Amino acid sequence: MSCDPVLRYGTFGGLFLILLAVAPIHYQGQVSQDRLAGAPETQSGARADYERPISLKQLPSNILHDQKPIWLFPIQVAKGKHLKPVVAVTLATAGLVALDPSVGGYFRNNPRYANWPNGFWSGLNTALATAIPPATVYAVGLARKDSYAQDTSLLALEAVADSELVSVVMKSVTGRLRPSDVPPHGDFTHTWFKYPGTFGNSGSFPSGHAIAAFSVASVFSYRYRRLRWVPWVAYGGAGVIALSRIPVQAHFPSDVFVGATLGYVVGRYVVLRR
C-alpha cells in the first residue's frame, strides 16, 4: 500500500509530460482550422497572443528588463496598489507558517515517508519534471518549424530565470532551515534567520522547485489556454511537483505556497505582460 501514492503521482507526472509535449501540435491544428473557417487572426491566430519578441539572443536582455517591475513591486504596494492580493497572500502565508511545525513534525515522525527524499520524489527528479516539458516543446517546435512553440518555451525559461533570482535573494534574506535541517527532537518553530548555507544556497523559504514549476505552468497555461486541458495539466503537474517537496522534508507548506504564488505572478504578470 505504501507504493500506491508514488505510483499514482508518478503516472500523473508522466501524463503531464506527454500532454504538454503534444500541445503545440494540437494548438497549431486548431489555429489552422479557425483560419480556414474565416475567424479573425486577432482572436484565433497564434501571433495574437504574442507579447513581445523573444529569442535565445534576446533572452538575457529580456531577463534584465524584467528586474525593474519585479524589484519595484514593493514600492507599488506602498503606494496603495495591489493591496488586496498582497494582504490575502500575506494572511495565507502567516496561517501556513503557524501550521509549519505540526506538518514538519508529522513527516519527520512518519516512517512511511522515510525513503522519499532519495526515491522517486528526489529533488533531481522533480527538477527534471519541471525542465523536460518546455525542453520537449521547444524540440517539437524546432522539428515542426513552429515558432510559437519555441517562443513559449523560451518565455517559460525567462520566467524561471526571473523567479529563481527572487528565490535566491529571499532564501538569503530569510535564512530559513529546511525541515530536514532541524535536528532530531529539534524545535520546528525556530527555523528563521539560521543561514544554513552560502548566499542563496540551502535556504527553505521559498521553495525553488515550486517557484520554477509554477513559472512554467503560468506561461504554458496562458499561451495554450485555447486548449482547455492545458491549464489543468500544467497547474496540476506544477502542484504535484510543489507539494512533493513537503513529504521529503525539503520545505514547509508556507515555503511551497509562497514559491507557487511568486512563480505564477512572475510568469503571468511580468513575462507575459502586455
Image (cartoon, helix red, strand yellow):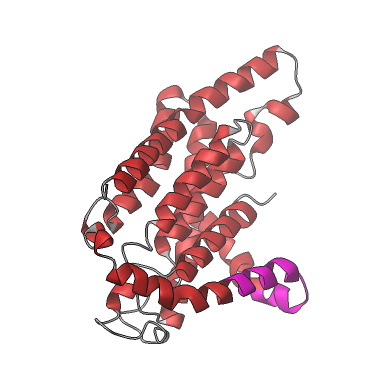
Camera-nearest residue between 155 and 191:
191
Determine if residue 55 is in view: no
Residue 4 appearing in the image: yes
Q: Residue 105: x, y in percent?
A: 35, 74
Q: Is residue 252 left or right of residue 69?
A: left
Which residue corresponds to the image point at 42% horizontal and 75% vertical from the top-left?
102
Question: Which span of residues is magenta-colored?
Answer: 74-92
Indicate the quadrant where residue 117 lies.
bottom left
Q: Quadrant of residue 86?
A: bottom right
**Residue 78, magenta (yes or no):** yes
The one of 238 and 108 positioned closer to us in this rendering: 108
Give the residue at x 63% y 30%. Answer: 46
Q: Main secondary structure of the magenta part?
A: helix
Residue drawn at x 46%, y 67% is 253
Q: Image check: 88 left or right of 57?
A: right
Which quadrant of the structure image shows residue 224?
A: top right
- Where does residue 273 sit, x and y in percent of width and height? 66, 52
Is 46 situated above or below 197? above
Is 201 a magenta residue? no
| Residue 49, percent from left and from top | 66, 37
Q: How many numbered marks does the figure carry?
A: 0
Check the image and name the residue furthest to the top.
Answer: 36
Q: Is residue 159 above or below residue 42?
A: below
Q: Closer to the camera, 238 or 152?
A: 238
Q: Residue 226 at x, y = what percent?
A: 64, 31
In the rendered view, would you say 170 is above or below 15? below
